[in-house]
Amino acid sequence: MSNSVSKRFMFTRMTKRLYLIVAGLWLLTGVPSVAQAPANADSLEVTWAEMYRFFDEPVDPAIYLVRPGEQLKVTFVGAKLGPLTLDIDPQGRIVHQTLGVFDLANRTLAEAQNLLKEALANNYKAERIEISVLEPRRVAVRVSGAVSQPGTYKGFTSHRVSEIIELAGGILFHGTTRRIEFSGGPKLLIVDLDRATYLGDNSANPCLYAGHSIHVPSKTAHRVQVVGEVNRPREIELAPGDDLITLVALAGGARSSADLTSILITNRPGRVDTESYSPHDGEIILIPSRAVSSDDERLLIFGAVGQPGTYPYESDATLGHLIEQAGGVDDDAGRGLVTLFRRAHSDEWGRTSQHRYPITSAVGADGSILSMTLLPGDSVYVPFKVGYVKVSGEVLNPGRYPFIEDKDAMFYIMTAGGFLPRADKTKVSIYNRIARTTAEFSTGVLVHDGDELIVNLREELR
């Protein structure tokens, strides 16, 4: 287990003990809880469900805002010197008896590094001097605009803008997801949660270390609709730089049945040139389905198998046989989430509610592949391991925890610090990241690699 994971588990145990101590004092003193405050109170919202974690990717020193209470670690490379820890006091200064006084208030990590390195080089002999920030700190963040509960919330500098917006009740229907303003740092950042969600662009959903004020404006009238053979037909607010490929991706991506060479757009005759297309307000972009071919009768398998690809359909084809044909399951496969996708049947009018539907019960309780009979056009996905389980909702320390084989939901709930008082302790929701489905189970259900375990509020509190 890595040092960062060890520290996280250690912190979880310490936090749980601290919670029990403070909860006892609360019962003795009768101090009102945050939940008793008015719903529209403009005050600091502090809950025991606040999540702690280390940064999930390298920080950007150019926008990292150094804050009072943080610690900087100085490492002397190529010298027999131990690391030096520098504390930033409440005034935003470093006061050191040898180095001097440095005012770091409202400075970025890059600016702090430049200020300190000259003084360090004059006092310490080393080939290179590296300065890094230590653990994430809790910060107050103001959330305003089109959210359910505007106010001030607390989060760690490693949290992202989207997570604080969730604490504020989420974005209202008329609020934008593409032009969120994140300010208070070295520069104004525009947050685009659509790009972060559908394109995996984390830079469009920055960490809280880059500012301390989030404003969600209303949507503009600059919107288009993307419909047809995409995974999530929807209306999309336009942003600078959007092209046709980006818009299709923001609609969940094209289905395997899509014909991307025959895209149709309202008020534009003929086929569209995807490279030269520039979106206009109010347009409807239709992604048509391609003509049925013999390839639709083949079987497709992809993911963590030896030889992913298409295979001929045979009348006695089974899931296990197809996996054998594809070279078997790789060692780094998440066997528990092997999923079969099947074409949906159409009614007499040729309509379907969805193009394909997932069959997630493809693996037995012992981890063996079930002998499921396949149909023409079936596709099978064998996912790769991600190595973690996400725990969210009404637990003490929501976050990601290492996946361990054959552990049930209760194990991960206790790993996350246990239930909060408002939690429904009888059942949990499991989000399957492959099938994109959520279902309710008892707390004894086995949890698979990559699952999200959601502990919900009790029914009477919803």
Image (spheres, grey):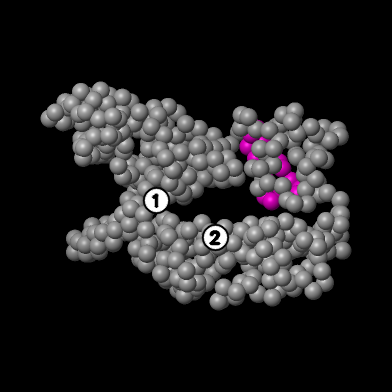
**Residue 401 appears at what percent x and percent y?**
42, 59
Say which residue appears at 27% left-offset and 34% top-offset. Answer: 78
Query: The N terminus appears in which quarter of the rendering?
Result: bottom left
Q: Amino acid at mark 1?
A: Ala
In reply to whether residue 226 is colored magenta, the answer given is yes
Say which residue appears at 71% left-offset and 43% top-offset. Answer: 226
Front residue of this view, candidates 6 and 187 = 6
Residue 377 image-quadrant placement = bottom right
Say which residue appears at 63% left-offset and 29% top-offset. Answer: 241
**Residue 126 appears at what percent x and percent y?**
25, 30
**Residue 37 appears at what percent x and percent y?**
33, 52
Q: Amino acid at mark 2?
A: Asp
Q: Secondary structure at mark 2?
A: loop
The residue identified by callout 2 is: 332
Front residue of this view, candidates 44 and 229 = 229
Q: Horizontal placement of 422 versus 82: left or right?
A: right
Highlighted range, magenta: 221-238
Q: Which of marks 1 and 2 precedes in the sequence? A: 1
Task: Tell me, for residue 39, which label it has, or none.
Answer: 1
Which residue sits furthest left? 97
Q: Is residue 263 above or below residue 374?
A: above
**Residue 55 in view in this figure:** yes
Residue 94 image-quadrant placement = top left
**Residue 445 appears at what percent x and percent y?**
50, 73
Q: Is residue 193 above or below residue 30?
A: above
Front residue of this view, candidates 319 and 217 = 319
**Residue 392 in view in this figure:** no
Say which residue appears at 58% left-offset and 66% top-offset. Answer: 335
Q: Residues within 10 Å of mark 2 (few under 14, many from 20)?
A: few
